[in-house]
Amino acid sequence: MSRLVYVLNGPNLNLLGKRQPHIYGHVTLADVEAECRELAGELKLDLRFHQSNREYEIIDWIHAAREEAGGIVINPAAFTHTSVAILDALNTFEPPVVEVHISNVHKREAFRHHSYVSLRADGVIAGFGTQGYSLALQRVARLIDEKAA
């Protein structure tokens, strides 16, 4: 089983730390990536970290992950609530998928309460700020280890 994990980030997360800091905090996506890379090293995981404002790029990365990855951590951002195409791509990926949201989407607008991605995800982490990425990586690592055992 591959120990490569794709960490995929959707639209506007490139503005993390600048956009609505009262909701998303002051940590940047570069900070999140650095923290993920450090933890991945401790967990003996390889990491591919991507962000895009374009749905098709996220779908292409999911397709690439099918060939080489042992898991996906995905923060689909606004695509969470709209993208059947991302759900369909994730449904072609057999290893673990963990969905991450920085804010608690269930305390926000009603349209944010529905996630297409959750229909495929093996777990969902919401409301833990950027720490959710670390929790997701730990969970994916454990699922990879359990499958290998």
Image (cartoon, rainbow, N blue to C red):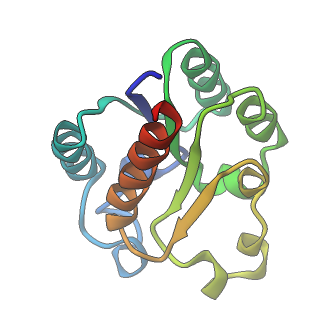
Q: Is residue 19 left or right of residue 88?
A: left
Q: Is residue 4 left or right of residue 40?
A: right
Question: Is residue 8 among what the camera can see?
Answer: no
Residue 134: x and y, percent? 32, 57
Closest to the observer, 9 or 135: 135
| Residue 102 sits above or below residue 118 on the image | below
Closest to the observer, 103 or 99: 99
Question: What residue do we see at 60% from left, 59% from top?
Answer: 123
Closest to the observer, 31 or 18: 31
Residue 91: x and y, percent? 78, 34
Q: Is residue 121 left or right of residue 40?
A: right
Residue 69: x and y, percent? 49, 23
Image quarter of residue 4: top left
Looking at the image, the residue that sits furthest to the bottom is: 107
Question: What residue do we see at 29% from left, 62% from top?
Answer: 17
Residue 105: x and y, percent? 61, 76
Question: Is residue 117 among what the camera can see?
Answer: yes
Looking at the image, the residue that sits furthest to the top is: 67
Closest to the observer, 9 or 123: 123
Q: Total number of numbered labels?
A: 0
Q: Is residue 15 left or right of residue 121?
A: left
Question: What residue do we see at 39% from left, 44% from top?
Answer: 141
